[in-house]
Image (cartoon, grey):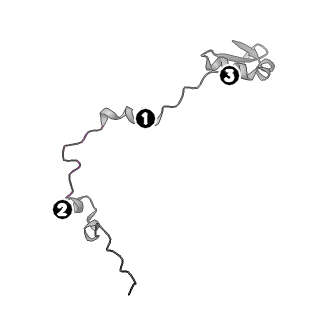
Amino acid sequence: MSYSVHQAKTNFSRLLKEAEAGQEVIVTRGKKPVAKIVAVEPAPSRKELAGAYAREVYWDDDAFDPVTDEELVQMGMGYLLDVPLVPAPKKSKRK
């Protein structure tokens, strides 16, 4: 459908409904088309984005096995070897 600028300003909500329904709305100045109103495609959800990569992610059976000290050093995380896994309990001040 084609509308003049005045008609478009007056009936903007209706033009948006037409665009949402899949119609292409043209706004004209005189006889010259100056704008097109079309529906925007909805953005993909996070779930759809994650699913897009589902077949591209692979891992070996040992991917979740514990890492050895040597492997930690090779990965540049040797500093983790000197850190206790569980912090020491705090001493109470009771007597």
The amino acid at mark 2 is Glu
Cα–Cα span, label 3 and label 1: 28 Å
The mark found on residue 70 in the picture is 2
The amino acid at mark 1 is Lys
- In this rendering, position of residue 46 left or right of residue 40: left
Mainly helix, strand or loop, the magenta region?
Answer: loop
Task: Residue 73: give x, y in percent of width and height.
Answer: 23, 63
Does dot 3 land on a helix, a strand or a loop?
helix
Place residue 18 in its image quadrant.
Answer: top right
> Crowdedness of circle 2 by 10 Å Cα count: few (<14), some, many (20+)?
few
Span shown in magenta: 57-69
> Crowdedness of circle 3 by 10 Å Cα count: few (<14), some, many (20+)?
some
> Crowdedness of circle 1 by 10 Å Cα count: few (<14), some, many (20+)?
few
Q: Identify the residue shown where x is 63% and y is 16%.
A: 24
What number of labels is visible?
3
Q: Is residue 34 visible?
A: no
Earlier residue among tags 2 and 3: 3
Q: Identify the residue shown where x is 20% and y is 58%.
A: 71
The quarter of the picture where the C terminus appears is bottom left
Does dot 1 land on a helix, a strand or a loop?
helix
- In this rendering, position of residue 39 left or right of residue 9: left
Earlier residue among tags 1 and 2: 1
- In this rendering, position of residue 22 left or right of residue 47: right
Task: Residue 5: give x, y in percent of width and height.
Answer: 78, 20
Q: Is residue 11 above or below residue 47?
A: above
Q: Report the mark closest to the observer, 3 or 1.
A: 1
Place residue 28 in its image quadrant.
Answer: top right
The mark found on residue 16 in the picture is 3
> What residue did someone put label 1 on?
47
Does dot 2 land on a helix, a strand or a loop?
helix
Taking the magenta stretch, the answer to whether it contains residue 60 is yes
Q: Is residue 45 above or below residue 24?
A: below
